[in-house]
Amino acid sequence: NPILSLITNISDDHKQILGETLEEIASEKAGIIKDKVPVIISTTQDKIDQIFKEKAHSHQSEIYFADQNYQIINSKQYSNYQKIEIEPKNEVLGTKTYQLDLRGTYQRFNILGVIQAVEILNKQHFIVSDSAVELGLKKVIKNTGLLGRWQKIGINPLIICDTGHNYAGVTEVLKNIQLQKFRKLHIVLGFVKDKDVSNILKLLPQGATYYFCNAQITRALESKDLQSMAAKIQLQGSYYPSVADAFNQAKLNAEKEDFIFIGGSTFIVADLLKYLKYKRING
């Protein structure tokens, strides 16, 4: 049994497994809630909050909505990190500023759940000091080996990959792309078959050049099929048999002032990072 459960924001994802609606997906996610174990919901979502409340009540579990107890009052992105200033909503404890080595604006959703979790753990007699939290958030990548979260691959041109892979995730990725300065945008893109690809494609900018590809897994949506779907909504580009082929073509086409983004699927990013590691080892 866990000592604490945490659920981040809910979006359309894995519909073939979890359900067709947000309510059905939330009900499946709520399965993590266990008897008399506190549960944290990072983000309030009016459409599904009651599902979590009822599930927690049935298990006699305390439930906390992190964004109802804490708020971000300031945040700023830097080249290799970001700073986020947080204050409690219901207590006069003052603000605290955290430096994160994880970039991407979507981390503002995740960090509130982290801070709420630390508060609950301390109430359970775990000793998690403020300095430990500050240091841990500053060194997430070093301490955990986490990859693919708005990860910088190169400069001149700037090259970023991110594993955001559902509607909400891609929406946040696009917000981060819009914060960048570049001459032209190149997007290396691929998905798996069980995603809501049609609606995700509608989010993407028509002015970018696309390099459609597929990861080397059976779940992958074929790059030729993805190109065909994208062309129907005026997203223009060629298709490639692998992530490496698509990425190398994007690099050939890009100028120093351009921006290359790689994503759409965790598997696309994984294939890219494996390819880059192989190149480093084998020259």
Image: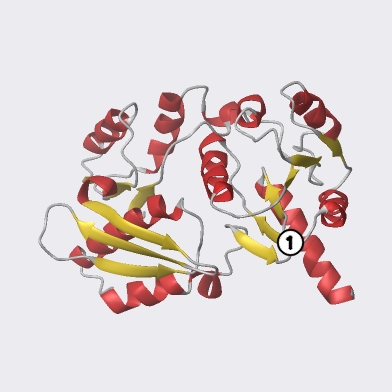
Q: Residue at x 53, y 52 (%)?
A: 179
Residue reaching furthest to the left: 92
The x, y position of residue 1, in whole percent, is 36, 54
Q: Classify mark 1: residues with Cα within 10 Å, few (<14), some (14-19) or many (20+).
A: some
Q: Which three-letter amino acid code belongs to the residue tagged 1?
A: Pro
Q: Is residue 30 left or right of residue 281?
A: left
The x, y position of residue 16, in whole percent, is 60, 27
Front residue (pair 163, 57): 163
Number of numbered callouts drawn = 1
Front residue (pair 190, 160): 160
Q: Secondary structure at mark 1?
A: loop
Residue 129 seen by the camera: no
Residue 125 in the image: above or below residue 235: below
Residue 96 in the image: above or below residue 267: below
Q: How is the image coloured?
A: secondary structure
Image quarter of the C terminus: bottom right
Q: Residue at x 67, y 44 (%)?
A: 265
Q: Is residue 138 left or right of residue 239?
A: left
Which quarter of the figure has residue 72?
Answer: bottom left
The x, y position of residue 224, in whole percent, is 86, 31
Front residue (pair 204, 224): 204
| Residue occupied by mark 1 | 157
The x, y position of residue 227, in whole percent, is 81, 31
Which quarter of the figure has residue 137?
Answer: bottom left
Residue 209 in the image: above or below residue 66: above
Residue 35 seen by the camera: yes
